[in-house]
Image (cartoon, rainbow, N blue to C red):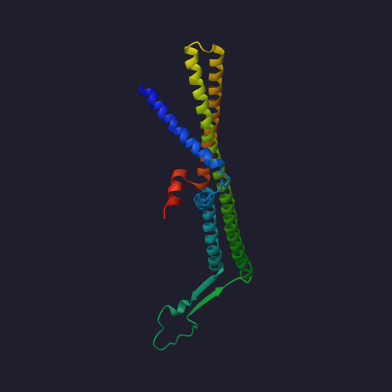
Amino acid sequence: MRYYLFFLAFFLAAKVNAQSLTDSIGNPGFVLEDTISDKLAELAINNYMIKADDAEIKSMNHEIKKSKASWFNSLNASFNLNEANIKAPAADQQNVFFPRYNFSMTLPLGSFFTKASDVKIAKARHEKAIAMKNADVENLKKLIKMEYQLYQSNKYLLALHELVLQDERVLLSVAEAKFKKNEVGLEVLTLASKKYNDELVKKINLLKDLNSSKLELENLIGMSLEEAIKKISQP
Protein backbone atom coordinates (compact mmCIF):
# COMPACT_ATOMS: atom_id res chain seq x y z
CA MET A 1 0.00 0.00 0.00
CA ARG A 2 2.85 2.35 0.87
CA TYR A 3 4.45 1.62 -2.49
CA TYR A 4 1.33 2.67 -4.35
CA LEU A 5 0.96 5.81 -2.26
CA PHE A 6 4.59 6.74 -2.91
CA PHE A 7 4.20 6.08 -6.61
CA LEU A 8 1.02 8.16 -6.71
CA ALA A 9 2.66 11.08 -4.89
CA PHE A 10 5.71 10.95 -7.16
CA PHE A 11 3.53 10.73 -10.23
CA LEU A 12 1.41 13.71 -9.19
CA ALA A 13 4.47 15.84 -8.35
CA ALA A 14 6.12 15.05 -11.68
CA LYS A 15 2.83 15.67 -13.46
CA VAL A 16 2.45 19.10 -11.85
CA ASN A 17 6.05 20.12 -12.70
CA ALA A 18 5.78 18.90 -16.27
CA GLN A 19 2.39 20.56 -16.70
CA SER A 20 3.77 23.82 -15.33
CA LEU A 21 6.58 23.67 -17.88
CA THR A 22 4.08 22.90 -20.64
CA ASP A 23 2.02 25.93 -19.68
CA SER A 24 5.17 28.07 -19.71
CA ILE A 25 6.17 26.84 -23.17
CA GLY A 26 2.65 27.38 -24.43
CA ASN A 27 2.80 31.02 -23.41
CA PRO A 28 2.91 33.27 -26.54
CA GLY A 29 5.81 35.21 -25.02
CA PHE A 30 7.98 32.12 -24.48
CA VAL A 31 11.47 32.33 -26.04
CA LEU A 32 14.56 30.18 -25.79
CA GLU A 33 16.93 33.12 -25.45
CA ASP A 34 17.74 34.48 -22.00
CA THR A 35 20.47 36.35 -20.16
CA ILE A 36 22.15 33.13 -19.08
CA SER A 37 23.40 32.40 -22.60
CA ASP A 38 24.91 35.89 -22.83
CA LYS A 39 26.68 35.46 -19.49
CA LEU A 40 27.92 31.99 -20.42
CA ALA A 41 29.29 33.41 -23.67
CA GLU A 42 31.56 35.71 -21.64
CA LEU A 43 33.26 32.59 -20.26
CA ALA A 44 34.67 31.84 -23.72
CA ILE A 45 38.07 33.04 -22.47
CA ASN A 46 38.34 29.76 -20.51
CA ASN A 47 38.31 27.72 -23.70
CA TYR A 48 41.55 25.88 -24.49
CA MET A 49 41.67 27.53 -27.92
CA ILE A 50 41.69 31.01 -26.39
CA LYS A 51 44.38 29.97 -23.93
CA ALA A 52 46.45 28.78 -26.90
CA ASP A 53 45.89 32.16 -28.57
CA ASP A 54 47.10 33.92 -25.42
CA ALA A 55 50.23 31.80 -25.44
CA GLU A 56 50.83 32.71 -29.08
CA ILE A 57 50.40 36.42 -28.34
CA LYS A 58 52.87 36.14 -25.47
CA SER A 59 55.33 34.37 -27.74
CA MET A 60 54.99 37.09 -30.40
CA ASN A 61 55.55 39.75 -27.75
CA HIS A 62 58.82 38.09 -26.76
CA GLU A 63 59.73 37.89 -30.46
CA ILE A 64 59.37 41.68 -30.74
CA LYS A 65 61.70 42.21 -27.77
CA LYS A 66 64.15 39.71 -29.23
CA SER A 67 64.13 41.47 -32.60
CA LYS A 68 64.76 44.83 -30.97
CA ALA A 69 67.62 43.48 -28.85
CA SER A 70 69.25 41.76 -31.85
CA TRP A 71 70.77 45.13 -32.81
CA PHE A 72 73.49 44.48 -30.27
CA ASN A 73 74.42 41.20 -31.98
CA SER A 74 75.55 43.19 -35.03
CA LEU A 75 77.94 45.42 -33.10
CA ASN A 76 81.62 44.55 -33.49
CA ALA A 77 83.96 45.99 -30.89
CA SER A 78 87.76 45.89 -30.83
CA PHE A 79 90.32 46.99 -28.27
CA ASN A 80 94.09 47.37 -28.66
CA LEU A 81 96.69 48.27 -26.02
CA ASN A 82 100.20 49.29 -27.13
CA GLU A 83 102.54 46.72 -25.61
CA ALA A 84 105.25 49.28 -24.87
CA ASN A 85 102.92 51.23 -22.64
CA ILE A 86 102.46 48.26 -20.35
CA LYS A 87 105.93 48.74 -18.87
CA ALA A 88 106.74 51.99 -17.17
CA PRO A 89 109.32 54.10 -19.17
CA ALA A 90 112.73 55.01 -17.76
CA ALA A 91 113.14 58.30 -15.98
CA ASP A 92 114.93 59.91 -18.95
CA GLN A 93 112.48 58.52 -21.51
CA GLN A 94 109.12 59.70 -22.62
CA ASN A 95 106.19 57.62 -23.85
CA VAL A 96 106.20 58.00 -27.59
CA PHE A 97 103.39 55.54 -28.26
CA PHE A 98 100.13 57.37 -28.65
CA PRO A 99 97.41 56.59 -28.12
CA ARG A 100 98.03 54.17 -25.32
CA TYR A 101 95.03 52.08 -26.38
CA ASN A 102 92.58 51.86 -29.28
CA PHE A 103 88.87 51.08 -29.02
CA SER A 104 86.50 50.85 -31.96
CA MET A 105 82.92 49.73 -32.61
CA THR A 106 81.37 48.99 -35.99
CA LEU A 107 77.81 48.38 -37.14
CA PRO A 108 77.15 47.06 -40.65
CA LEU A 109 74.97 49.47 -42.65
CA GLY A 110 72.70 46.60 -43.74
CA SER A 111 71.64 46.12 -40.13
CA PHE A 112 69.70 49.40 -40.25
CA PHE A 113 67.40 47.84 -42.83
CA THR A 114 67.31 44.15 -41.89
CA LYS A 115 66.84 44.61 -38.15
CA ALA A 116 64.15 47.25 -38.63
CA SER A 117 62.33 44.88 -40.98
CA ASP A 118 62.60 42.04 -38.45
CA VAL A 119 60.97 44.21 -35.79
CA LYS A 120 58.15 45.20 -38.16
CA ILE A 121 57.56 41.56 -39.08
CA ALA A 122 57.46 40.56 -35.41
CA LYS A 123 54.97 43.36 -34.66
CA ALA A 124 52.80 42.32 -37.61
CA ARG A 125 52.72 38.73 -36.34
CA HIS A 126 51.83 39.98 -32.88
CA GLU A 127 48.92 42.02 -34.26
CA LYS A 128 47.79 39.04 -36.33
CA ALA A 129 47.81 36.81 -33.23
CA ILE A 130 45.66 39.35 -31.36
CA ALA A 131 43.22 39.59 -34.28
CA MET A 132 42.95 35.80 -34.46
CA LYS A 133 42.23 35.62 -30.74
CA ASN A 134 39.48 38.24 -31.02
CA ALA A 135 37.94 36.33 -33.94
CA ASP A 136 38.10 33.07 -31.99
CA VAL A 137 36.45 34.69 -28.96
CA GLU A 138 33.58 36.09 -31.00
CA ASN A 139 33.07 32.78 -32.79
CA LEU A 140 33.09 30.88 -29.50
CA LYS A 141 30.56 33.29 -28.00
CA LYS A 142 28.20 32.59 -30.88
CA LEU A 143 28.72 28.83 -30.58
CA ILE A 144 28.11 28.94 -26.81
CA LYS A 145 24.82 30.78 -27.29
CA MET A 146 23.72 28.33 -29.99
CA GLU A 147 24.73 25.29 -27.92
CA TYR A 148 22.99 26.64 -24.84
CA GLN A 149 19.78 27.02 -26.85
CA LEU A 150 20.16 23.45 -28.05
CA TYR A 151 20.72 22.31 -24.46
CA GLN A 152 17.62 24.19 -23.33
CA SER A 153 15.59 22.76 -26.21
CA ASN A 154 16.60 19.24 -25.25
CA LYS A 155 15.59 19.92 -21.64
CA TYR A 156 12.16 21.12 -22.71
CA LEU A 157 11.67 18.23 -25.13
CA LEU A 158 12.55 15.78 -22.38
CA ALA A 159 10.15 17.45 -19.94
CA LEU A 160 7.34 17.43 -22.49
CA HIS A 161 8.01 13.82 -23.32
CA GLU A 162 7.76 13.00 -19.63
CA LEU A 163 4.05 13.90 -19.81
CA VAL A 164 3.56 11.49 -22.69
CA LEU A 165 5.50 8.78 -20.85
CA GLN A 166 3.42 9.22 -17.70
CA ASP A 167 0.20 8.99 -19.69
CA GLU A 168 1.37 5.77 -21.33
CA ARG A 169 2.37 4.42 -17.93
CA VAL A 170 -1.15 5.11 -16.61
CA LEU A 171 -2.72 3.44 -19.65
CA LEU A 172 -0.45 0.43 -19.16
CA SER A 173 -1.43 0.20 -15.47
CA VAL A 174 -5.10 0.35 -16.42
CA ALA A 175 -4.58 -2.35 -19.07
CA GLU A 176 -2.77 -4.56 -16.55
CA ALA A 177 -5.57 -4.14 -13.99
CA LYS A 178 -8.27 -4.94 -16.57
CA PHE A 179 -6.26 -7.90 -17.86
CA LYS A 180 -6.12 -9.35 -14.35
CA LYS A 181 -9.90 -9.02 -14.14
CA ASN A 182 -10.26 -10.63 -17.60
CA GLU A 183 -11.87 -7.43 -18.88
CA VAL A 184 -9.43 -7.17 -21.79
CA GLY A 185 -7.41 -9.68 -23.74
CA LEU A 186 -3.67 -10.18 -24.07
CA GLU A 187 -3.62 -8.13 -27.29
CA VAL A 188 -4.74 -4.97 -25.48
CA LEU A 189 -2.16 -5.48 -22.73
CA THR A 190 0.60 -6.16 -25.26
CA LEU A 191 -0.27 -3.04 -27.26
CA ALA A 192 -0.26 -0.85 -24.14
CA SER A 193 3.08 -2.35 -23.08
CA LYS A 194 4.57 -1.73 -26.53
CA LYS A 195 3.49 1.92 -26.55
CA TYR A 196 4.99 2.46 -23.12
CA ASN A 197 8.27 0.79 -24.13
CA ASP A 198 8.41 2.89 -27.30
CA GLU A 199 8.17 6.02 -25.19
CA LEU A 200 10.93 4.71 -22.92
CA VAL A 201 13.17 4.35 -25.97
CA LYS A 202 12.37 7.94 -26.96
CA LYS A 203 13.24 9.08 -23.45
CA ILE A 204 16.64 7.37 -23.63
CA ASN A 205 17.38 9.10 -26.93
CA LEU A 206 16.28 12.46 -25.53
CA LEU A 207 18.49 11.94 -22.49
CA LYS A 208 21.40 11.12 -24.78
CA ASP A 209 20.80 14.30 -26.79
CA LEU A 210 20.58 16.34 -23.60
CA ASN A 211 23.83 14.92 -22.23
CA SER A 212 25.61 15.43 -25.56
CA SER A 213 24.57 19.07 -25.76
CA LYS A 214 25.65 19.58 -22.14
CA LEU A 215 29.08 18.06 -22.80
CA GLU A 216 29.54 20.18 -25.91
CA LEU A 217 28.53 23.31 -24.03
CA GLU A 218 30.99 22.50 -21.25
CA ASN A 219 33.72 21.92 -23.81
CA LEU A 220 33.10 25.37 -25.29
CA ILE A 221 33.12 27.25 -21.98
CA GLY A 222 36.01 25.23 -20.55
CA MET A 223 34.31 24.13 -17.32
CA SER A 224 31.33 22.16 -16.05
CA LEU A 225 27.93 23.74 -16.59
CA GLU A 226 27.22 23.66 -12.87
CA GLU A 227 30.45 25.51 -12.15
CA ALA A 228 29.72 28.01 -14.92
CA ILE A 229 26.20 28.72 -13.65
CA LYS A 230 27.58 29.22 -10.14
CA LYS A 231 30.24 31.57 -11.46
CA ILE A 232 27.91 33.80 -13.46
CA SER A 233 25.44 33.89 -10.56
CA GLN A 234 27.97 35.49 -8.24
CA PRO A 235 27.44 39.25 -7.69
When asked about the image quadrant of residue 92, the answer is bottom left
The front one of 173 and 145 is 173
When asked about the image quadrant of residue 68, the answer is bottom right
The front one of 169 and 233 is 169
Q: Position of residue 194 (x, y in %)?
A: 55, 20
Is 90 rendered above or below residue 2?
Answer: below
Tally of numbered tags: 0
Q: Which quadrant, please, contains the C terminus?
A: bottom left
Is 192 rendered above or below residue 60?
Answer: above
Inspect this view and state whether residue 88 appears. yes
**Measuring 38% from the left and 23% from the top, which residue is drawn there?**
3
**Measuring 47% from the left and 16% from the top, which residue is drawn there?**
177
Q: Position of residue 160 (x, y in %)?
A: 53, 34
Q: Which quadrant, please, contains the N terminus?
A: top left
> Extreme bottom residue here?
92
Q: Position of residue 51 (x, y in %)?
A: 51, 52
**Measuring 49% from the left and 50% from the top, which residue is drawn there?**
46
Inspect this view and state whether residue 215 appears. no
The front one of 22 and 33 is 22
**Measuring 63% from the left and 72% from the top, which residue is drawn there?**
109
When asked about the image quadrant of residue 213, the answer is top right
Q: Position of residue 207 (x, y in %)?
A: 52, 33
